[in-house]
Image (tube, rainbow, N blue to C red):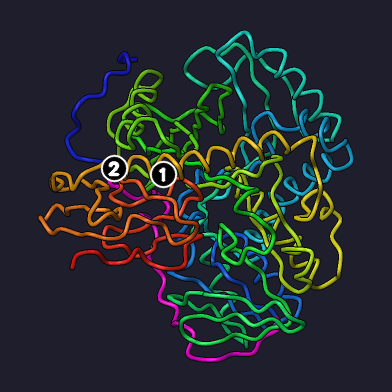
Amino acid sequence: MNGGDVTEEAGEPVPESLWLATTSSTEYEPLPGDRRVDTAIVGGGIVGLTAAIRLKEAGHEVAVIETGRVVEGVTGHTTAKLTSQHGLRYDRLCSTFGREYARQYATANEAAIDAVERRVEEDGIECDFRRTEAYVYTESRSDGSDLLDETRAARRLGLPASYTETTPLPFDVEGAIRFDEQAEFHPRKYLLALAAAVDGDGSSVFETTRALDIDPGRQPRVTTDRGVVVADQVIVASHFPFFDRGGYFARVHPKRAYLLAVRISGEPPEGMFYSTATPPATIRGAPVDGERLLIVGGQGHEPGLDGPATSERYRRCEAFARERFEVESVEYRWSTHDLSPVDGVPFVGRLGPTTRNVYVGTGFDGWGMTGGIAAGTILADLIVNGSSPWADVFDPNRFTPAASAKALVEDNALVAARFLGDRIRTALAGSGTLPSPGEGTVVRQGGKPVAVSRGEDGELHAVSAVCPHMWCLVEWNDAERTWDCPCHGSRFDPDGTVRSGPALEDLTDRSG
């Protein structure tokens, strides 16, 4: 090992997800005008495309509506672990939801792995799918009892769990939970094959088409910037539910983590790994051009008032990698953006009590691969059959005060503190010094907060700093050159163009 020092490399890492960098972009046409289908799906990620292919195979005409390009959003920035092992989860689920609901959660996620394997084999999809083991490990003796409790809970639920004191990692651990027969894959290769299978024979994938509103009546209508889609059912699979009739702004909070794909001396360890540290670390290998790189990262946090800059979080990820592996180079870097539900379980089912024909899948808490596949399956089953064996635990209209009350109060108090803190800082700020190339800052001009940034080419951008979703102030992301909303996770390009929601509108131009 080389002590964790971050040294200069021969070249800078590609600031792009490994999955995006190793696949071609798609070019599906935008919605050409008004359309009538059986089911409209807003969002072309893992939830939307899983539901779409299952509905099409059941005889439905489907329209997938994607703001940008399919599988380039949250799904394209994952670690791509197909596992039912979601940190230390099952002991808590048994305590707060009961064993039957915990078993539904476990079974749904195990079934998701099997579903991917079955489709890969039947359709001949080349997506680097392979079975492997997953580990939750600790380097601290104080976590040993938690690992044992989790192992016992997982085994009672029928999961392939065992406790071990050794792992394939090249450093010592105090203990670990091992799940057998989990899997890894290339999510874009898999999902682009699904998108191609959806598009045609009456069903369509529409890109560069932004959904703006939903009329949730008996026959829902999705209004987009290119026309209206009328359907019998609508699935909102847009990461954050842009059509929020279920109060999701208060029931999920954004979470961000940072990933590197590095080349190391020798082969990456066999398996997928997740630590109990705070913040947790994540590790897995991935095949690229005949070799296996190591994906390593972490630094997960809820965007807030304080904390290190994005560039510092990447630096810490690199330091972690160098402390534990012989890193030769850092090839790619990217960040993940997740939504964490207040009670720890995704929301999958009818979007709200008054939206009978509108469904949602959101809040996967960083485990959106199996979670998203399970969600797409459940939603398709609810639409086709009226029921799903796993639906109860994920019901968006559930009432779980024991599991969620404390987190609900704390999360929304933090949002309120951000909102107030934003206003105080802006009131105290002056016009400020214009930023240097690659930098951005929020200043006050005419009493209004303005987000000012300068590109590497020297071009200056000035846009409103007020996120149009719920009016929090955006913050500059110094590594990815975006304006990010700390309250609910919206992201914007330097010129104010919305990159990802829940915001639907761009930041207003203030350059005049």
Q: Is 394 rendered above or below residue 103?
A: below
Residue shown at the point (86%, 30%) measured from the top left: 156
Q: Which mark is residue 335?
A: 1
Looking at the picture, how far across and down is residue 160, in whole percent? 76, 33
Q: Secondary structure at mark 2?
A: loop
Residue type highlighted by circle 2: Ala
Side of 273 relative to 492 (left or right): right
Residue underneath mark 2? 479
Q: Nearer the viewer, residue 103 or 469?
A: 469
Would you identify the image quadrant in which residue 159 lies?
Answer: top right
Residue shown at the point (25%, 42%) measured from the top left: 429
31 is within the stretch colored magenta: yes
For the residue carrying disc 1, how many other residues have a C-alpha within 10 Å: few (<14), some (14-19), or many (20+)?
many
Residue shown at the point (74%, 63%) measured from the top left: 352
Looking at the picture, how far across and down is residue 71, in whole percent? 49, 62
Report the magenta stretch's main SS: loop
**First in residue order: circle 1 vs circle 2:** 1
Give the Cα distance between marks 1 and 2: 10 Å
Looking at the picture, how far across and down is residue 288, in whole percent? 39, 46
Q: Residue furthest left?
A: 458
Q: Is 401 rendered above or below residue 466?
A: above
Would you identify the image quadrant in which residue 87 lies?
Answer: top right
Callouts 1 and 2 close, C-beta under 8 Å: yes
Would you identify the image quadrant in which residue 53 lies?
Answer: bottom right
Side of 175 relative to 44 (left or right): right
Identify the magenta region: 14-38
